[in-house]
Image (cartoon, rainbow, N blue to C red):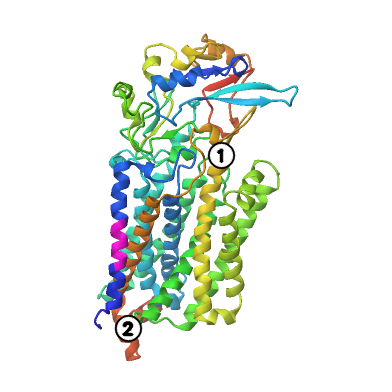
Amino acid sequence: MKLGMVIKPSRCIGCDGCTVSCKTYNALGPNVVYRKVHKFEVGKYPNAKRASFPALCNHCENPACEKVCPTGATYKDDKGRVQVDPDKCIGCRMCMGACPYGARTFNWGPQQSYFPHSEAGNVIDEAVAPRHRVGVAEKCTMCKNRTDEGLDPLCVHNCPARALVFGDFDDPTSEVSKLVATGRTYTLLPEKGTLPQVHYMD
Amino acid sequence: MEKTSSGFKALCGALGLIAAAGVAVWIYQLMGGLAVTGMSDGTSWGLYITCFMFFVGLSAGGLIVASSASVFHIEEYKKVALPAIILSTVCICCAGMFIFIDLGGIQNVWRMLVGLNFMSPLAWDMIVITLYLIINIIYLVMMTSKNLETRSKVRIVSRFALPVAILVHSVTAWIFGLEIARDGWYTAIMAPLFVVSAMDSGLALLLLALAGLQKAGWFTVEKKLFSNLAGLLATCVAIDGYMVGCEALTMAYPGAEGADMLAIMTSGATALFFWIELIVGILVPFCILVFAKNRQKTGMVVFASACVVVGVFCKRLWVLLTSFVGFAVSTPLGVIGGAEVWEATVGYSPTWAEYVIVAGVFALGTLAFLILSKKMLGGSKKAAAAGSKDPAQEALDGLVTEGAAS
């Protein structure tokens, strides 16, 4: 299996729904995002318009982060996703220097809460809590728990404009494979040789 | 040996206090996480890694001079081999400490022993630095051995020491030089640049240490050897400048991304360090040391050496930080800079905790060097005072000359 995504920035309305759903699902504290929608102004006034560009971990086929990780904490899992094992991460941050997409964040200190004074606001799902342990690197897991069950990652599920398509690149009948077969898709920084499994298409 | 002076005791006490403060703040950092430092997702390495590079480099001078003595049969270098190796050992220990201090998940560090990924430059670094430390210690043990047979075997160790010394700097460079995401680091010049930076800062520190030991009366260095080493330093400084020039030209010429990175170095966030390195670290010491007359003056050599050490520290800073400032992902719609990729800003300035920990390691290193020097070099002062060579040393010199002749 080679799970991945095709993103259509031209369909993106820049609502940040993907970012918010991701933050909620993964219990990300302030200043931590796994994925983001970058906003650009394209053209010059009066012919300017706003354009959005969603970006996340590319779950590369040849991940730079995996290669430099000294303990094998970063690995390609059986479904072709790039994962971090917080039990193996020594917090050296080689991966943060290696990722050309800036897809990783680091737990510099104990996780902060948006609701420091509320007990109820600080309950973190046990499935995601280990990732936020102090001193380890973390990143998008392509919603491992959801995609293991055959569901879409939450950002894909939540996108109102259907700008994100999720699927298996190893399955030639999947929608993502068909989109890539059109020859109209591209990846970010192809010159780095990372072979992203997140493709873009206009 | 004379009685330990009260001044020396006071100095050791002060250094010990600073080191203790460093340890205390390190414990504080272990409790609070690296959030107590100024590092962030945008600048994920800071002062600790700068100091790591710096100390690996400082360690070079000693071992390279000491092993060159045997490998290239440069007889006069042999006389400073012992203080050189003490310096080298202390510096590599400091470098190792900085790696541990910089780790966020130190509780998992045992994973480096059981599940090492041999593709990682950090894995290579651990192996080579360990090897390097072992060689330094073997060197120390052999050179201070009472058994002449053992002392003559130094020659054999030095055959391994020199290549490992070159490798330790190269591997440290590859920690950065193989990070494909960073245009400023990902260049083949990194390893040779690190080797030459290590040679010049290491030699400069060795000269400073020798001058200090001489002043303290613990060790005597011949003036000729001192100016000879200063000449070697001038050559290394020139090669360093040449390599920086090669890299800058290659970055600037296409006028593309490399030029943006160069602009950060020459007129942007890291410009201060870049220009200090070029002027204080290369231009000034080279102009001083290129003249044989200046190399005869201890004061001049000490000043130039101090300049080189400061310059190389600044170089470590701009090499490290420029690539964080210049991080960018290009998309068809435009370029996404580091400040947009992560929520936090890219700017970095060390916090008080970082300064105290760094000061602690510097103090600990100085203290270790002072104590080891006092213990191991104690005899040479007496020998110098008596106006004759250490008899054991004399016998050893004879052995080595025989070996070289055969």
Farthest residue in the top direction? A173
Q: Quadrant of residue A110?
A: top left
Which of the numbered marks, if any, corresponds to residue B381?
2
The residue depicted at 56 percent of the width and 64 percent of the height is B281
* First-in-chain label (1 vs 2): 1
Is residue B19 shown in magenta?
A: yes
The residue range painted magenta reads B14-21
Farthest residue in the right direction? A46
Farthest residue in the front direction? A117
Farthest residue in the bottom direction? B387
Of A178 and A119, the residue lying toward us? A119
Q: Is residue B218 above or below residue A160?
A: below
Please indicate whether residue B366 sits to the left or right of residue B334 in the image: left
Q: Chain of mark 1?
A: B
Q: Residues within 10 Å of mark 2 (few under 14, many from 20)?
A: some
Which of the numbered marks, if any, corresponds to residue B327?
1
Q: Is residue A54 above or below residue B358?
A: above
Q: Is residue B141 visible?
A: no
Of B155 and B252, the residue lying toward us? B252
Residue B141 in percent (x, y) is at 28, 68
